[in-house]
Image: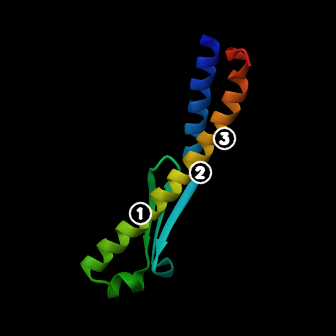
Amino acid sequence: MFDKLMAAQQKADEIKKRLDTVSVFGEVEGGAIKITATANKTITSVEIDEQFYKQADKEELEELLLTAINKALTQADQVSAAEMQSATKDMLGGLGGMFGG
């Protein structure tokens, strides 16, 4: 039982490391603002098109930044959830014998 718990913890650590290598993106206004993050929700890049930046007012820029960041974080959630679901399915398949199944 303890071995299976250790294996589960190791698997979770592996997933976390893998999610650090997966990039997700959020963009608005046809790419005028692009946000890049890891699937572990660490923002790694913010790009704002120079022409757009010159024309945008402060409120519009702030609102669009929030939208782009939230899109990236939503995508990160989806990737993370898919990875965890896949890992959980693998682990439960391996744990089935523990319960007399």
Q: Secondary structure at mark 2?
A: loop
Work out whether mark 3 precedes mark 2 in sequence or the reverse, and give the earlier one.
2
Instruction: From the image, tell me which residue sits under label 1.
Output: 69
| Residue at far top of view | 2
Of callouts 2 and 1, the N-terminal one: 2
Kindly report which numbered mark, 1 or 3, lies closer to the viewer in this rendering.
3
Q: Position of residue 28 (x, y in %)?
A: 46, 75
State the residue at coordinates (72%, 14%).
Answer: 100
Q: Is residue 38 visible?
A: no
Q: Tell me where residue 23 sits by quadrant.
A: bottom right
The residue sitting at 60% across, 37% down in the picture is 15
- For label 3, count other residues whose C-alpha is less than 10 Å away and answer few (under 14), some (14-19) or many (20+): few
- Where is residue 84 shown, x and y percent of the image? 59, 40
Specify the label residue 15 is tagged with: none
Q: Which residue is identified by label 2?
A: 22
The percent position of residue 60, horizontal first and vertical second, equals: 30, 79
Q: For the residues marked 1 and 3, what is the alpha-carbon distance in whole angstroms?
A: 26 Å
Question: How much space separates mark 2 and mark 1, taking CA atoms?
Answer: 16 Å
User: Counting residues from the N terminus, which is met first, the one under dot 1 or under dot 3?
Assistant: 1
Circles 1 and 3 in contact, beta carbons < 8 Å: no
| The one of 56 and 63 positioned closer to us in this rendering | 63
